[in-house]
Image: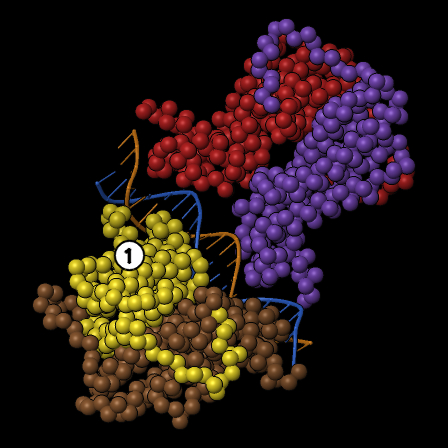
Chain colours: A red, B purple, C brown, D yellow, E blue, F orange
Amino acid sequence: MPRAVRERQMMDAAVQTFGQRGYRAASMDEIAELAGVSKPLVYLYLHSKEDLFSACIRREAQALVAAVRAGVDPELPADGQLWSGLRAFFTHTAENPDGWAVLHRQARSHGEPFISEVVVMRDEIVAFVTALIGAAAREAHRDPALADRDVAGLAQALVGAAESLAGWANDTSDVSAKEAAATLMNFAWAGLENLMHARPWQPPADVSRGSADDGTS
Amino acid sequence: MPRAVRERQMMDAAVQTFGQRGYRAASMDEIAELAGVSKPLVYLYLHSKEDLFSACIRREAQALVAAVRAGVDPELPADGQLWSGLRAFFTHTAENPDGWAVLHRQARSHGEPFISEVVVMRDEIVAFVTALIGAAAREAHRDPALADRDVAGLAQALVGAAESLAGWANDTSDVSAKEAAATLMNFAWAGLENLMHARPWQPPADVSRGSADDGTS
Amino acid sequence: MPRAVRERQMMDAAVQTFGQRGYRAASMDEIAELAGVSKPLVYLYLHSKEDLFSACIRREAQALVAAVRAGVDPELPADGQLWSGLRAFFTHTAENPDGWAVLHRQARSHGEPFISEVVVMRDEIVAFVTALIGAAAREAHRDPALADRDVAGLAQALVGAAESLAGWANDTSDVSAKEAAATLMNFAWAGLENLMHARPWQPPADVSRGSADDGTS
Amino acid sequence: MPRAVRERQMMDAAVQTFGQRGYRAASMDEIAELAGVSKPLVYLYLHSKEDLFSACIRREAQALVAAVRAGVDPELPADGQLWSGLRAFFTHTAENPDGWAVLHRQARSHGEPFISEVVVMRDEIVAFVTALIGAAAREAHRDPALADRDVAGLAQALVGAAESLAGWANDTSDVSAKEAAATLMNFAWAGLENLMHARPWQPPADVSRGSADDGTS
DNA sequence: GATGAATGAGGCTTCATTCAT
DNA sequence: TATGAATGAAGCCTCATTCAT
């Protein structure tokens, strides 16, 4: 059997096992058995558990980014791009729950060097969303321009909400990718739009709770 | 040394270790050493690694919920309640990064029975937010009323965004709790308000994309 | 509470625990709890687990020997003495199943120094039975006298059968001490009597199975 | 080295260690070292201490039963069968003292599920002896027939005596298997024969002793 | 007389990883 | 290319035992 095929089988088994059991609880024995090969072969091809997990993260991250990119038409206006990107995102995570678990839950829970791997991907998506928000702001001729920091925070919030909704949709029966995407658009878009037009929500003058307890840890 | 004090030391050490290393990677040896006691004492008081982790989850969950409750004045209007709740939430997670890591990352990554423990807390917060959105809708005399399912999705998205932002704020220097809360309010409130007044965002008529790919549960 | 009473409580708890769990599986914690005292007190009075187990063996052994002695009237003829001794033996083991388990099962399973403790008691009983058989032989004017080694073997067999029957009676509902004793008398006495009168069972001339496979380990 | 060979080495080491130290006191470390392998290999092949002990019991039980069966010629009359069976029994226990210790002392001292394993074997031997006694009774045209319960008690006593004598022979130098068998035949056969011919030993009319103390089941 | 607090030592079990073929 | 055989290291947990009060 050609190497590439064997390797794919192993990675599939690994993603499934890591996604369901977690990095530490998954055993190389189980992965090898699920892949239908002997353990030394796994080591021959993928070198170590750590390498294998990293490879899983990279593969799933690239697949997710590719799916989102493929779902977006850059000719559309900003809201159309966001809408189709979200739909692609939720569709992909729903179709690859183990891969999504690897990226969203497991990779983030086991320190370096795995976090860095997902951060690369997440940053790519955040950058994409950031650009989208920037484009929307320009479309709206917002003036003065949104501060970069505000845009970053908004992108984080949007991506974070999307990630959280993906987990929720995966764990809740009868929530389709489309519904999840619509929920998020409903939730977010109008707020973004208000920002675009320089009508941010204003915190009340905070007289009663003046204790300076909002430090950064 | 009295038992209660020792127990607190152990739980503190456990939260720190679990939060930084993860459930499986944390070793009872390390926790005991960090607590400054011998391993058997940890077992005498906390019975097992599983029990210890559950106890950490419960303690941190209760502390977080209590902090949020204490930060909210039920006499305020809905947006005021949301604002102060978010501030309390981000303040608490910033001050207890390990506890937040236990709740947000580790407890969710290691299956039952831990997930159930956090789900209880999360549901409590989601219910609180759900009630808030409902109250806001009534304040706005929205008619027809928001569907329950929509409210649930919105609450999920809001809580998910908050959770994600808390991680982001913890990992990014110089982001204060207040800024995180303001970002989220900016992002979310206007969108919610639009919903209150029955002006939801409308997905475009979806002609170009087939309908097959968006319903994987 | 006076020391003697406390000590008896502890020994009672220990006999029960050792008899039911075995020497190694019994824990000092469980014994102390069953006795209703704290662990250090057990150590203060009984010094160590080994000492405690030895003390249990000695106490139960003495109680058993005393019960058998008390049940035998030395004025009776040999078969009467055997009969009443067996009845006393089976009655006592039935009334003290945990003590009997300590002596018969646990003490023999855990090497020195415990085996020596029971051997002392067992030898005492074997000696008693040996004397009985010798007396019976003299009563029967057996000539030539039974060889000492034969008598020893017979006494072993008798005591062994009694021990085995005691376990069987304890584990089988509805077998009374009297029945067990009668069974053993039926089984043994007539054989012994034949021996007394120099009519031993004769092994057949062993021509076919001459292989010298009857070594002594 | 092929698996079957290694497995036998491990079982041999385990029987020796369990027989001499007892189930709880034997350590997997010691067994592995005695077998000349590493501990993980023991677990790979035999799964757990409990499984290993059960496997030892089964192997030794089957070996003993097989040895007794092989030593008995079913064409012989009842006493000849008993005689040759006893010789085979004592020969085997003398040649496998550790195996016999496992069956007779250790398996019985450590509760379920081990007791059940030996009980199966013991019941097989008891059934064999019971059939023998029944056959002898028919050979002797005993009338009325022996009650089933009496036969059961007698078989228990005979097997118990044999078990006890096996231990005695193993612990006493210079007692050959043949001698042990002869002792037991002397002790038992004539008594059985008397029973066959309906001449049981009769307990004396029990006037002196109250009836209260002999029925604790 | 009595105990709450504490631990050194050791046992069972698992796992990532390698070697020889 | 592929694997049966094997292990060093480490983790969870328990227990007999002691100290300070």
Q: Residue at x 68, y 57 (%)?
A: B8
Q: Residue at x 87, y 25 (%)?
A: B138
Task: Name which residue type carries label 1.
Answer: Gln
In the rendering, at what x and y percent does residue B71 appear? Answer: 82, 41
Is residue D127 shown left or right of residue B67?
Answer: left
Q: Which element carries disc 1, helix, strand or loop?
A: helix
**Chain where mark 1 sits:** D
Quadrant of the image occupied by residue B7: bottom right
For this rendering, which residue is in front, A165 or C15?
C15
Q: Residue furthest front?
A: D143
For this rendering, which residue is in front, D104 or B185?
D104
The C terminus of chain A lies in quadrant: top right
Quadrant of the image occupied by residue C73: bottom left
Taking C115 as reference, is B101 above or below it?
A: above
Taking C176 as reference, is D73 above or below it?
A: above
Residue where numbered disc 1 is placed:
D62
Q: Residue at x 9, y 68 (%)?
A: C207
Quadrant of the image occupied by residue D155: bottom left
Q: Residue at x 37, y 84 (%)?
A: C82
